[in-house]
């Protein structure tokens, strides 16, 4: 039969990636949505890069970056005694980079679609930028936040290319479900591959269904 | 006393408009800002609020310097004691009526003023309604209450009633007046409606092509400028012979009135022509309704 | 008359360009990725000798096998193991049973200059070595061989936590080559290849300590049916003395 560790590992990776990206992307999207200048356009390009680059390319360059023979990898090993290749931490970093645009774009699009007057009204009432973000802006883009969370989570579950390059397929640490499916197929164990795939699909469908259902509830309130 | 002297190059649809204005407003005055579309009215208001930065100049409100380009002072809107009523209301969709107004207050402020405002704007019964369920007039009242909740030194209103129907309009104008007199805020309202300006405000800034053409009581500015007294301007509608006179229907302001005139004054007139009617000689009669 | 000829010729040319070159014969060979270096020389020799064009399709053994079983038009399959050719035969896509053409040799390879490298392998226990790359035993015979070797010399249990698995010999090589794995087990053919020849140091491991890494080739049903003469010719060439010399040169055992 199949092992359950890959499934749990995949879920763990997806949850942590989504949480990290959620808290990272809000200030980033906010910064980009303010007055535009050349730096912000540059930032938008960089955020969108993982969409365009093949995951294997991202993974490959991460592998080079993590290598103890290169400056970044060497620095990590000397100061923190940590090697990111073949570790869950390395996968997390790869995931965060790979799914970054999926969290930032919906939030950014939500923020820019809010009328400026909403923000200005809040400022005129004496609220700081942070208070405005937390009390006025974010509560009014809930569907966008939800979209970002859903897309990021689903995208990470399916992540293959990046993990393939830097994971090392270590049981209990980096052998996520997508790699497990691949291995079973390569080993011609199509039966096992089907089981892994079925479990992943079932989990993904359930999560997506729950999240979209909640989104409809939110929309209903808004339309009234 | 509110004083401002501002210069700004504005980019309008048809070129660049150089805004150059200077004005002094008495404490607790209610003044209006009038001018053609694109004259710079909204920009002026936004600069006073701090949403837009002037190129040059100074804004001083009750001895507080809000902006001084020479000394590089530019207080952000959050630290200006200003209230702003937006044309699109700008109410927070995630809060109900009471919460929108409550949002204006700080943690330690007394909630007493909320009750006062809800009463004055007639919103008591709607306090828990989601703002999406309000009519335009109700929304504007919430916006007004929210803007004055902090008892700001300067209240700015950007065409607040332009989207409201006539009947609701006069109600709201009343509300505006009572709020203004109760809280004694200095208020500037942008309006195209001469009725409104005359009813509500004591002085009018007439902005034309970026400069203040006139700054005077509205009665003076909008006084019909003919040499004759006892005259009024209107649009000719129709004329009917009645004995030796003509019965003329005339549209003036928002009223259609019927006047007896002599021939041949009424001949050769087309519907829609602008005409002037004067009552020479005997003074007119007045009667309160 | 001329017009008739042209009307016939153009569609004919568009759809049967090969017919114009009917003189030139060709075969298509599916080749496992890590055999590609040896294959290039096999191809050159064969073409010189028989004037038959050899078209190589390089890929991962698993992928190629899958394609063959979906009816891909390959004449011969040169694999880097025996499992895939066997499954092709059992599923009925082969003309005859697969045959072993060479044996792979396992080496231990590192690009880290300061690491000691000796045949006793106990040095692998040192704390200086944090990661050891091997190919995934589930899908790569070199990985299975390395695992068995480690078990045989009694080091597997102690080294298990340091093991890092590459999905293929290529990826395993990449882990070692980029320095992400301190050291690892790979194929001799890899360290002798042009790309890796002068990188790092390696030692060949005692073939008694691991099961033979048999590499089989198989004549495919498609080839036997559509290209019988040339496909058979090439298939037999794989077992000739000429071919055996090439295998040796590229790091395979006979």
Image: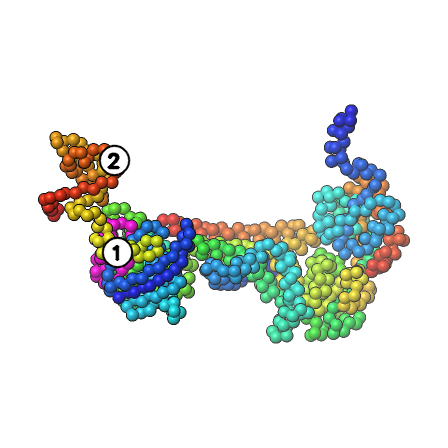
User: The residue tagged with tag 1: helix, strand or loop?
Assistant: strand
Of residue B101 and residue A113, the one placed in the foreground of this image is A113
Which callout, 1 or 2, points at the residue further toward the start of the chain?
Answer: 1
Q: Residue at x 60, y 60 (%)?
A: A5
Residue C116 figure quarter: bottom right
Q: Label 1, on which residue?
A: B204
- Colouring rule applied to residues: rainbow
Side (left or right) of A63 relative to A106: right
- Chain letter of disc 2? B
Q: Is residue B129 visible?
A: no
Residue B168 picture location, percent across and down: 25, 48
From which residue to which does the magenta span run?
A: B177-204
Is residue C74 found left or right of A203 in the rendered image? Answer: right
Is B195 part of what is drawn in magenta? yes
- On the image, the x and y values in percent for residue A211 come to 47, 53
Q: Chain of mark 1?
A: B
Give the secondary structure at mark 2: loop
- Please say whether residue A122 is one of the residues in the magenta stretch: no
Residue B233 badge: none
Q: Is residue A177 above or below residue C69?
A: below
Residue pictured at 13% horizontal, 43% vertical: B280
Residue at numbered disc 2: B271
- Give percent across and percent down for residue C147: 73, 63
Left or right position of A115 against C119: left
**What residue is rendered at 59% in x and 61% in y?**
A94
Residue ID at (64%, 54%): A181
Above or below, B81 against C237 in this view is below
Query: In terms of depth relative to the viewer, which is nearer, A93 or C215?
Result: A93
């Amino acid at each position: 039969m199949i092992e359950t560790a890959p499934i749990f590992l995949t879920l763990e990776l997806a949850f942590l990636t989504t949480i990290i990206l959620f808290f990272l992307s809000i200030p980033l999207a906010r910064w980009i949505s303010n007055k535009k200048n050349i730096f912000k356009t540059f930032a938008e390009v960089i955020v969108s890069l993982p969409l365009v680059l093949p995951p294997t390319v991202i993974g490959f360059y991460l592998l080079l970056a993590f290598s103890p023979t290169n400056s970044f990898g060497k620095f990590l090993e000397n100061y923190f005694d940590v090697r990111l290749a073949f570790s869950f931490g390395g996968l997390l970093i790869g995931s965060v980079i790979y799914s970054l645009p999926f969290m930032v774009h919906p939030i950014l699009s939500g923020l820019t679609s809010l009328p400026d007057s909403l923000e200005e009204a809040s400022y005129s009432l004496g609220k700081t930028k942070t208070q405005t973000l937390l009390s006025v802006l974010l509560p009014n883009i809930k569907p966008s936040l939800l979209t970002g969370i859903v897309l990021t989570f689903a995208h990470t579950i399916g992540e293959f290319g990046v993990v393939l390059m830097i994971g090392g397929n270590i049981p209990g640490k980096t052998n996520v479900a997508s790699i497990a499916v691949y291995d079973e197929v390569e080993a011609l164990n199509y039966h096992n591959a089907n089981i892994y795939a079925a479990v992943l699909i079932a989990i993904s469908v359930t999560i997506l269904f729950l999240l979209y259902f909640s989104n409809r509830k939110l929309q209903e309130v808004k339309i009234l | 006393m509110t004083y401002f002297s501002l210069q700004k190059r504005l980019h309008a649809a048809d070129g660049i408009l150089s805004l150059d204005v200077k004005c002094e407003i008495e404490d607790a005055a209610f003044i209006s800002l009038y001018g053609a579309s694109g004259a710079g009215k909204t920009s002026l208001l936004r600069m006073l609020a701090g949403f837009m930065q002037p190129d040059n100049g100074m804004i001083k409100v009750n001895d507080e310097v809000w902006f001084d380009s020479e000394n590089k002072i530019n207080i952000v809107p959050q630290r200006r004691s200003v209230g702003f009523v937006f044309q699109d209301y700008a109410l927070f969709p995630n809060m109900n009526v009471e919460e929108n107004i409550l949002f204006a207050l700080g943690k330690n402020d007394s909630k007493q003023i909320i009750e006062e405002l809800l009463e004055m704007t007639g919103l008591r019964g709607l306090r828990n309604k989601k703002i999406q369920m309000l009519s335009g007039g109700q929304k504007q009242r919430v916006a007004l209450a929210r803007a004055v909740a902090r008892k700001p030194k300067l209240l700015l209103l950007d065409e607040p009633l332009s989207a409201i129907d006539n009947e609701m309009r006069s109600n709201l104008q009343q509300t505006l007046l009572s709020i203004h007199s109760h809280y004694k805020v200095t208020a500037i309202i942008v309006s195209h409606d001469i009725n409104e300006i005359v009813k509500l405000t004591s002085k009018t800034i007439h902005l034309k092509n970026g400069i203040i053409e006139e700054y005077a009581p509205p009665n003076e500015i909008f006084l019909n400028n003919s040499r004759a007294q006892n005259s009024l301007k209107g649009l000719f509608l129709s004329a009917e012979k009645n004995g030796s006179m003509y019965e003329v229907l005339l549209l003036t302001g928002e009223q259609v009135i019927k006047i007896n005139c002599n021939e041949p004054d009424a001949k050769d007139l087309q519907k829609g022509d602008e005409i002037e009617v004067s009552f020479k000689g005997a003074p007119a009669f007045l009667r309160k309704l | 008359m001329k017009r008739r000829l042209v009307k016939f010729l153009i569609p004919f040319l568009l759809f049967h360009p090969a017919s114009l070159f009917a003189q030139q014969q060709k075969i298509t060979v599916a080749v496992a990725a890590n055999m590609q270096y040896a294959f290039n020389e096999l191809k050159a020799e064969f073409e010189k000798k028989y004037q038959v064009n050899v078209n190589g399709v390089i890929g991962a053994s698993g992928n190629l096998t899958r394609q063959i079983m979906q009816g891909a038009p390959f004449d011969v399959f040169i694999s880097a193991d025996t499992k895939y050719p066997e499954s092709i035969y059992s599923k009925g896509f082969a003309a005859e049973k697969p045959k072993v053409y060479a044996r792979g040799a396992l080496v231990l390879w590192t690009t880290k200059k300061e690491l000691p490298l000796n045949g006793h392998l106990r040095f692998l226990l040192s704390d200086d070595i944090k990661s050891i790359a091997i190919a995934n035993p589930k899908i790569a015979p070199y990985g299975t061989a390395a695992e068995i070797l480690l078990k045989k010399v009694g080091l597997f249990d102690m080294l298990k936590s340091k093991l890092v698995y590459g999905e293929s010999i290529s990826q395993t090589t990449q882990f070692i080559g980029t320095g992400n794995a301190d050291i690892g087990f790979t194929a001799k053919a890899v360290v002798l290849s042009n790309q890796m020849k002068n990188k790092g140091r390696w030692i060949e491991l005692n073939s008694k300590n691991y099961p033979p890494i048999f590499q089989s080739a198989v004549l495919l049903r498609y080839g036997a049916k559509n290209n019988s003469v040339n496909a058979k010719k090439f298939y037999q060439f794989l077992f000739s003395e000429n071919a055996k010399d090439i295998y040796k040169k590229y790091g395979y055992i006979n």
